[in-house]
Amino acid sequence: MIEAAPNPVTAVMRALADPTRRAVFERVFDSKEISVAELTRGSGVTQGAISQHLKSLKQAGLVAERAEGRNVYYRAAPQGLEPLVTWIDHYGVFWRERLQNLRDLLKEIDP
Amino acid sequence: MIEAAPNPVTAVMRALADPTRRAVFERVFDSKEISVAELTRGSGVTQGAISQHLKSLKQAGLVAERAEGRNVYYRAAPQGLEPLVTWIDHYGVFWRERLQNLRDLLKEIDP
DNA sequence: CTAATGCATTAGTGCCCACTAATTGATTGA
DNA sequence: TCAATCAATTAGTGGGCACTAATGCATTAG
């Protein structure tokens, strides 16, 4: 139960749990590429905050960057969501089994 | 971009972002039903902490409870994951099919 | 009845984190 | 050249959160 190991699921969950940071990811995702200045516009927070969020998202493997001139363009890295998908999908297996058991049971009762 | 509204996605993400609390959820899920005392055993934290985590999970719609005598038995509420699955379904382009199956399952479970 | 067990809740504490303001370095425009 | 723009980073701050210790309330056992 002692989980000191920095789990990738935890990293992704933590990165996306914050509404502001998740909104940044969503905007990056919806744009093919987007600069920091453009992300800052209408974000309600300062440019520094946006840069910090982008750093977190990058460390979580959720975004990638490309520098061009004095701009830095970010793009989404959807593969970064894989740990999350795997975690959730794990429960899908259980549900599947339970449903199957339930169906089997129903068939026995009402053949 | 100002997101003051307490989003259900945020609620679920936040609830599951903490490793200890997520471990509690996983143990609740793996057991059909489990008491607080049993959850506390081997959790590495006090009983009070477990109760607090269960309260958070309950408010996020991820667990439900059943009192019996002086025990309270918790069980998983899989439908609580629906906001998360829906969100990933939108952004996790690679795994949309996997998740679509999972969403169908959730609908079957929670009629 | 009395002691013990199960659970929730509270107050208190330390820590982490989201944010700002300011600075710095780099690049571009006039 | 000099000013302006873009982005990252830093120090500092407030607030929230995970946790403990302790208390209270039921319920059960002896």
Image (tube, coloured by chain):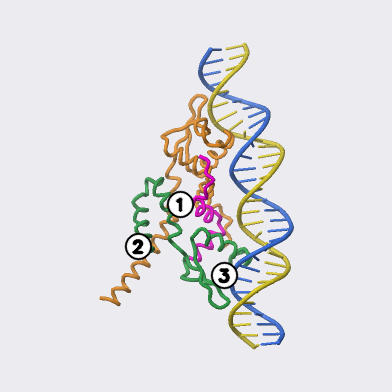
Chain colours: A orange, B green, C blue, D yellow
Mark 2 closeness class: few <14, some 14–19, many ≥20 residues within 10 Å: few
Alpha-carbon distance for marks 1 and 2?
22 Å
Q: Which residue is mark 1?
A: A84
Disc nearest the viewer among 3 and 2: 2
Residue B46 among magenta residues: no
The residue marked by circle 3 belongs to what chain? B
**First of labels 3, 2 by sequence position:** 3
Mark 1 closeness class: few <14, some 14–19, many ≥20 residues within 10 Å: many
Segment colored magenta: B1-28
Mark 3 closeness class: few <14, some 14–19, many ≥20 residues within 10 Å: some
**Amino acid type of disc 2?**
Glu
Task: Name the dominant secondary structure of the magenta segment.
Answer: helix
Disc nearest the viewer among 1 and 2: 2
Question: Mark 1 vs mark 3: same chain?
Answer: no
Residue B8 among magenta residues: yes
Alpha-carbon distance for marks 1 and 3?
27 Å
Question: Mark 3 vs mark 2: same chain?
Answer: yes
Tell me residue A22's x, y (percent): 50, 44
Disc nearest the viewer among 1 and 3: 3
Q: Which residue is mark 3?
A: B36
Residue at 33 percent of width and 51 percent of height: B97
Q: Which residue is mark 2?
A: B108
**Amino acid type of disc 3?**
Val
For numbered disc 2, what is the local secondary structure? helix
As displayed, is residue C30 above or below residue A104? above
Residue at 55 percent of width and 56 percent of height: B19
For numbered disc 3, what is the local secondary structure? helix
